[in-house]
Image: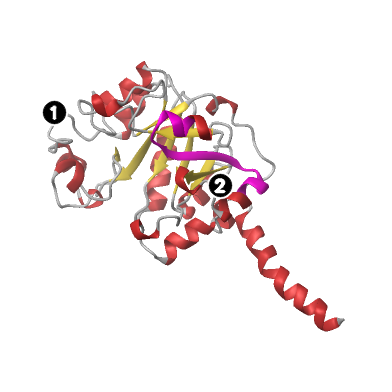
Amino acid sequence: MNSLFCLIAALCLPALIYLCLCFPHKPRRPIDPLRGWDYAHRGLWNREFPENSLPAFRNAVANGFGIEMDVHLTADEKLVVFHDDDLKRMCGDDRSISACTLAELQELRLLETEERIPTFDDFLRTVDGKVPLIVELKSDSKITRLCELAEERLRRYPGVYCIESFDPFAVRWWRKHRPDVIRGQLSLGLVKPSKQEKTLKVRVLASMMVNALSRPDFVAMEAVTDHSLPMRIQRLLRPWLVAWTVKSQEEMDRLRSRYDLQIFEGFVPDGKDMRKK
């Protein structure tokens, strides 16, 4: 009998530890000001308006969409709105964004247009509280400083916003210093391992065990991993759920009842394809 009890305990204990690590913030806090909106991924961009550019953000506001965007820290500790860690894809420059000063970045253009990399201040002035924001904090070696400077700006911002990050230490910073702000843990899936690095970091993010650090209000998960085991477990634990990145009206309609917020790109949610513009 004792042997059977020990066997059951040995089998159950890892599962209980896993559940404790995965737990989101409790009790679940209301996010009503963020709900009822679809969020344009890096703005409502197209061939004319590059992603994470001021025209793309104005386009999102004009069409009544919330905005998801990305914040990086420059070498001289300025905040800029940009997604990638390096400048190659968007600006044809081999440098990393964290190695450049703001003045150096302002000399570059986005995808050979006349648009420059916006500062976070320029972005906030452009949106001016007209639509809600999902602010993604991009992780680097100065993540604490990035959080401090972003909080300083957002403290004065009149509009609705929440923050999210892949870096659980960034989300944890907000948990500790600004517990009133709705925070989200970004996660990855492993349903297409051939297209992802099989690193420990990716596997830990996919498992959602980093929730132990961040205790997020919401979990933002790749839409393609909707039926993964960690995602099924999250549904039982009942955080708010955010889908990224939704790429068609059909997918959006299918996921509507399963997610509280959706981040989209490549189409306008009335069904028009942005890539044809």
Q: Which disc number belongs to residue 190?
A: none
Q: Earlier in the sequence, mark 2 or mark 1?
A: 1
Reading the image, the residue beneath label 2 is 175
Residue sticking out furthest to the front: 250
Badge 1 density bin: few <14, some 14–19, many ≥20, Cα 10 Å: few
- Residue at 20%, 25% in the rendered image: 48
Q: Position of residue 203 (x, y in %)?
A: 46, 62
Q: Residue at x 67, y 48 (%)?
A: 236
Q: Position of residue 240 (x, y in %)?
A: 59, 39
The answer to whether residue 236 is magenta is yes
Residue visible at 64% across and 36% down in the picture: 29
Q: Residue 247: x percent and y percent?
A: 38, 35
Mark 2 secondary-structure assignment? helix
Amino acid marked by disc 2: Arg
Tell me if 167 is positioned left or right of 93 in this view: right
Place residue 201 in its image quadrant: bottom left
Look at the image and give the residue range highlighted in magenta: 234-252
The residue to which callout 1 is attached is 114
Residue 135 x, y percent position in the rendering: 42, 37
Quadrant of the image occupied by residue 127: top left
Whether the residues at callouts 2 and 1 have beta carbons within 8 Å, the answer is no
Q: Is residue 156 visible?
A: no
Residue nearest the viewer, comparing 231 with 178: 231
What's the residue type where badge 1 is placed?
A: Glu
